[in-house]
Amino acid sequence: MACLYRTLQDFRDAKVEVDMLVISSPTEYHEEALELAISQHIHAVFCEKPITDDPQASTRLVDKATAEGITISVNFLRLWDDSMAELRSRIMSGEFGELQAGTGVFVKDITHNGPHMIALLSDLLGPVVINEEVTCAFTRLNGEGNQGACASLSVAGANVTLNKLDHELYNFFEIELHFEKVVLRLEDGCRRIVLRKPVPHPEYTKLLYPEDISVFNGNQRMALANAWREWQAFFEHGTLMRRDINWMLSQEMICHQIKAMMVEKNGDDALTKGIS
């Protein structure tokens, strides 16, 4: 039987038992919903990113949920896209060679779409580390909220620069990664994958140009179905999620750290407390 509750308080007062809570509300309501899940001992929670807009609150809630045996996962949609899993396998096999450099471009705040990008880079390439000196230089040049380069990252031994655009112009989320043997572009929100392999140029015969181009589509439409299959395995067999909540939290915390540098640059260190 389907029931509609207009507020979380109505749901709390109804004292119904549920197996899973899906949080797809605006970010400012996530903390209250997670507190509800913990207090009601709801076994599983699937939350939109970010967990909350406060790094201390996110850490506290994740720690509390873990202590209570509550499993949380964050909807970093591309983690369940089969095409991203295929790319990860090809990168890890060495097919593309070592990463040389990269660029990511996104719209909206660093803590809004930034976690999607950080999580994807980390999943494809390995741990992401902030180059603090360069990132601070970007914030001095641009200031909080301005467009352009906002962070310098070290990923797989290479530098990857993040750039923020004005979301009122158009929606945008793309990554370009330069490997030794291929240029990989994830376009249209990673729904289109472009591989450019270097080949001899017909005129400049001593040089290679990345003009052997292949394009294939991502499988983002099936990502949520794949995520649900992972949840189903969790419920039916106790299978662990491929990425646990502490890994997911750590990706968001990188974005909170970048945001804190922006705020600190403007003379407000409120967000920097407790972040290291």
Image (cartoon, rainbow, N blue to C red):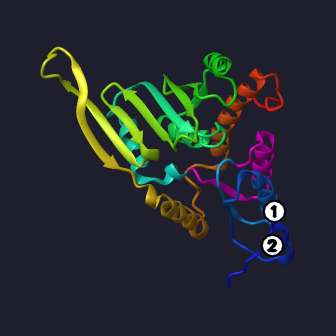
Residue appearing at x 83%, y 77% in the figure: 14
Residue 245 inside the magenta-drawn segment: no
The quarter in which the C terminus is drawn is: top right
Residue at 81%, 22% (x, y): give it. Answer: 267
Q: Residue furthest bottom?
A: 1
Amino acid at the residue labelled 2: Phe
Q: Residue at x 17, y 14 (%)?
A: 206
Residue 43 picture quarter? bottom right
Q: Residue at x 73, y 59 (%)?
A: 70
- The magenta region covers 51-76
The x, y position of residue 223, in whole percent, is 48, 58
- List the residue tagged with mark 1: 36
Mark 1: amino acid = Leu
Marks 1 and 2, the one that precedes in the sequence: 2
Q: CA distance from mark 1 to mark 2?
A: 9 Å
Q: What percent of the width, then of the height, locates residue 130?
A: 62, 25
When the figure is inspected, residue 193 is found, relative to residue 207, above or below; the finding is: below
**Residue 238 placement: quadrant:** bottom right
Drawn side of residue 19 relative to residue 63, left or right: left
Left or right of 22, for residue 231: left
Give the numbered dot on residue 11.
2
The percent coordinates of residue 255 (x first, y second) are 66, 35
Name the foreground residue: 179 vs 229.
179
Q: Nearer the viewer, residue 175 or 121?
A: 175
Picture layout, residue 95 above or below residue 78: above
